[in-house]
Amino acid sequence: METQPTSGGCWSVLVMIAVALFGGFGFLAARSAVVDVPPTPSEAVILQFSAEATADDQQLTVDIITQRLTALGMRPVVQLNPSSDGDPATIRVLLPGGDDFQATLDLIRQAGDFELVDLSGLNPSDYQDALIWTTHQAEVGALRAADAQQHPETNQPFTTVLDNTHLMKAEVVVDGELGTWTIDAIFDQEGGGILGVFTAAHVGEPLAIVVDGRVLSAPVIQAMISGEAVIQGNFTLTEARQLAAKISFGALPVPLELVSIG
């Protein structure tokens, strides 16, 4: 099965560790080492919470941003400034400048909401790189984008099979033979069971890999899968590490508005 490149130039395919979704993919084993980010001039980024964000939401957001940056080998400086005199709370983050600044800024601002979504009976190529509205997004109260599609037959949200609450971690790995970078997604026991039951009953149907409502790809299920899966594509090391860091620690609980840089 062929997939089309995403807007970022990456192709993404979900494959099983033990039994490949697609024939011909090699076994992925060698893991990448964390590489320290070289010292560069820092940029101070100010992000603002909505007035409705609770103290718990604010602290959880700080924790997730700190974990994401640490996963990239950085030594993050993340400062929470509580609301005062009626002004909303903010977060001040020091980010290294350079070529990766925009990608790192996106990393700390974007929700990082990972899902596997049922596209049974549909043409997966019709949804490549598309924004879709899912049952998971509706349940957590996410903001629906104006162009987010619903299921064409029911005009209801697409059904989420598995969401990020069952994702234990995502690690960058390298194919020793091909030299390509991939992401090993490891689910908890409950999530593995849910995925196993679903894929056993939907062999031959597409299952979409979705991050922040956008379909990265929708490979066709070739066999029952559970436990571990791999997001595989033509990622650079930086792209793979950014995506793994974004989805590894849960989604941000509330949206953030960029106030200033510098």
Image (cartoon, rainbow, N blue to C red):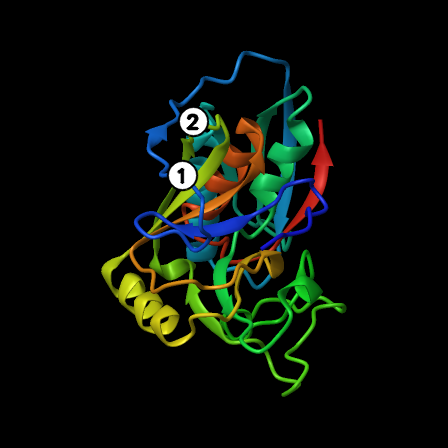
> 21 and 163: which one is in front?
21
- Is the residue marked by circle 2 packed among few (<14), some (14-19), or many (20+) residues within 10 Å? few
Identity of the amino acid at label 1?
Answer: Gly
| Location of residue 236 with respect to 115 vertically, above or below | above
Q: Earlier in the sequence, mark 2 or mark 1?
A: 1
Which residue is situated farthest in the top direction here? 39
Q: Which mark is residue 26?
A: 1
Q: Which x, y percent locates residue 175?
A: 42, 31
The kind of residue tagged 2 is Glu
Under circle 1, the secondary element is loop
Disc number placed over residue 177 in the picture, else none: 2
Q: CA distance from mark 2 to mark 1?
A: 8 Å
Image quadrant assignment for residue 212: bottom right
Query: Are the residues flagged by discs 2 and 1 in contact, CB closer than 8 Å?
Result: yes
Could you tell me which secondary element the residue under label 2 belongs to? loop
Q: Residues within 10 Å of mark 1 (few under 14, many from 20)?
A: few
- Tell which residue pokes out farthest to the left in this image: 189
Q: Residue at x 53, y 67 (%)?
A: 206
Nearer-the-camera pick, 28 or 46: 28
Image quarter hosting the C terminus? top right
Of residues 19 and 36, the one drawn nearer to the viewer in this rendering = 19
